[in-house]
Image (cartoon, rainbow, N blue to C red):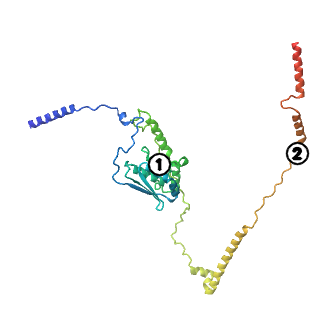
Amino acid sequence: MASSKQDGQAAASRKSEFRSQKPKPESRDESELLTVPDGWKEPAFSKEDNPRGLLEESSFATLFPKYREAYLKECWPLVQKALSEHHVNATLDLIEGSMTVCTTKKTFDPYIIIRARDLIKLLARSVSFEQAVRILQDDVACDIIKIGSLVRNKERFVKRRQRLIGPKGSTLKVRKVVLDTMKNIHPIYNIKTLMIKRELAKDSELRSQSWERFLPQFKHKNVNKRKEPKKKTVKKEYTPFPPPQPESQIDKELATGEYFLKASQKRRQKMEAIKAKQAEALSRRQEERNKAFIPPKEKPVVKPKEASTETKIDVAAIKEKVKKAKSKKLGALTAEEVKLKMAADEKKKKKKK
């Protein structure tokens, strides 16, 4: 027992010596490890990275609706040109209504076929070629969100989808915003949170801290307004007696006296009732046709009111004013003003003498 204890102590001392001999890791700032230097970009994937190319051919196909056929036929040469730069073939089948992309022997980028698949998916979903072709860039990605099955009521679905559509048909490009909008959470709340996060990311001190204290907390207030039924059922008073038995056809005929008529007489009555209904329908149709020939009621002619003596215009006075204005030059002085001016000039001359 004593020897086993001594062996254990010796092994523990060896472990402590080994730990002390290990080099201590250099102390680094955590913020430097988490942040990416400004201006850094991932180098593009070139043919030198994969000189031998791909081992097997890969292909993807997708269907498109009939209304997209005319647009795709116009822009398809541009699609083929954009994909040929990455050595990817593209075919458009108008009979089946499908688009297919596949790699070739010259294709060196293994991920370009996924981007080509996303390109034809976007084109099939009414995205313009100018926007869809950006998916071939390394720093661009897309996400197709299916919102058709999220809301059952069609009216609610249309209202909530309208919140996502922006100017000129542009939509919000964040998945969480789209899904929350379909759950009846207005996009303005999520947009405000994203704006706050963008401002906090600019501060180097707050990058490694929790941002929950700065973010707004929105409470979901769901007020259920119960719709009243169109037909309100009023409960009848309880009676222990059963309801009266409805009259049978024989009872009705006995009450009217038809039961005692012969078959020929019954037939004659039915024919007379049918002819009476036909005559009423014919008269109604004739009245509707005659409405087109009835002239519309003309509006009564309103006689113009005689001008009152107070509002009559004095033509003679206006003519005299016009004559005076013509005789008088533009900016010229009146006769009285000229006399006053001459008298003032004479006084000035006398004072000078």
- Within-10-Å neighbours for mark 2: few <14, some 14–19, many 20+: few
Q: Distance between the residues labelled 1 and 2?
A: 80 Å
Residue that label 2 marks: 309
The amino acid type found where label 2 is placed reads: Thr
- Quadrant position of the C terminus in the picture: top right
| Side of 63 where 262 appears, left or right | right
Give 2 or 132, whichever is nearer the viewer.
Answer: 132
Q: Where is residue 112 in the image (x, y as percent from the top left)?
A: 40, 49
Seen at 47% across and 48% down, the residue is 133
What SS does tag 1 mark? helix
Q: Which residue is drawn at 64% across and 81% down?
A: 271
SS at circle 2: loop
Residue wearing tag 1: 133
The residue type indicated by label 1 comes to: Val
Q: Where is residue 13 in the image (x, y as percent from the top left)?
A: 16, 33
Residue farthest top in this picture: 353
